[in-house]
Image (cartoon, rainbow, N blue to C red):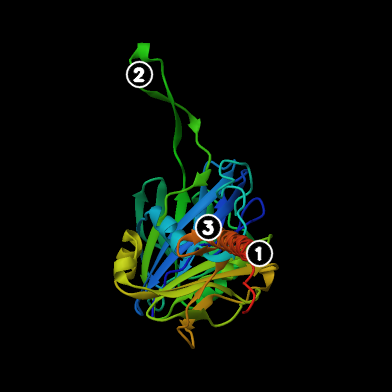
Amino acid sequence: MLALLGAQTVAVAWPAYACGCGAMVPADQSRIGVNQETSVVRWDGHTEQIVMRLTVHGDAAEAAWIMPVPHRASVKLGESRLFDELAALTAPRPQDRPYFWPRSGDWPFEGTDGAAAPPRASGQAPGVDVVGRQRLGPFDVARLAADDPGALRDWLRDNGFSLPRRVADQLTPYVERNWEYVAVRLAPGKKQNATDTADGGGARDTGPRVLSGALQPLHLTFSSDRLVYPMRLSRAAREPQSLGLYVLAPHRMETRGAIGGRPPEVTFADVLEDADQPELVRELAGGDVHLTAFRQHFPEPEKITGDHVLRRAASDRPFHRTYDRDVLLRWGGVPAWMVTVGGALLLVLAAAVAVLAARRGRRRHGSRPPFPPAA
């Protein structure tokens, strides 16, 4: 089994407290919105990898993003191009819809305008254990183990962030299962303005940047004996949530349930041979795999009942989205209308020739002298 999971676009209230499989918490007196959250997950039955890219907007110069994971995670920077490769693989495919008569852009109308178609040791005091911390590009990444959501909230507060009560409440089930967390401080640094080249060039700080646009992806790796996509924190969202899910596995995959949203819709399912995979997908997949893509809408996030768990589907039947593409009907490479019109003209011409030949024959017959009388 595996998986590659991903693409999720989420509209959240300001300030943003939830975004798909994590929670986004801005610094005090600032706002942040998540325009898009795209996640790619690879699972081989023992290890799960999630590559996540956030696209954000607002006036926050820094924010914290928190994601629960079932075991201790390692973190590194990911590649943005991976998401482009996945989008291309799952894009709708054209389905030709032939038309007979030529339209704008077809000969003879070319050129005209027209529209184209880990558990904690017993007896240890509750709290937060920072099991690792590192700087990755614009991210300050802390890997945390927490005994209770209150301790996690206190840790975030001591580091400049306020975890809302409704988000802390959704962390309780993860604490009970001894999950850990990845807490990422997002800070883009200082703005740089070029100085006059007459002064020797260089740049000067003009103040903090705000978090805006697509952030560099983060790549998380952790142990997991089943494919789980954390969604519980999305219950704290104030706006409807939309989830896109890509799954790479030995077989077509499906979710076990709707977890409080509308039934997931399959948008792509097919086998991808290793030789046909783009570079970054091949590195993540590691051989021939099935790619399954889903999309799902959560109009009332407070009704989300838990995390997504994925399993093998009953059938590996392929599925592709399609769209109609109007194409000029051709026979043997020649536009059908030309063959038809040309054939009709030939028939008319042949008929005309036959009529003329008949008339000439009658004239010749009428000009012959009469037979001589019998003797």
Q: Nearer the viewer, mark 1 or mark 2?
A: 1
Which residue is identified by label 2? 201
Q: Nearer the viewer, residue 49 or 296?
A: 296
Q: Nearer the viewer, residue 168 or 305?
A: 305
Q: Position of residue 121 (x, y in %)?
A: 37, 76
Q: Under tag 1, what secondary structure?
A: helix
Which residue is identified by label 3? 37
Rendered image quadrant of residue 224: bottom left
Find the distance from the CA under tag 2 to the CA under tag 3: 38 Å
Q: Under tag 2, what secondary structure?
A: loop
Amino acid carrying label 3: it is Glu
Amino acid carrying label 1: it is Gly
> Residue placed at 46% from the left, 55% from the top?
53
Which residue is identified by label 1? 366
Q: Position of residue 217 (x, y in %)?
A: 42, 54
Rendered image quadrant of residue 29: top right
Q: Position of residue 42 (x, y in %)?
A: 38, 70
- The answer to whether one can see residue 27 in this image is no
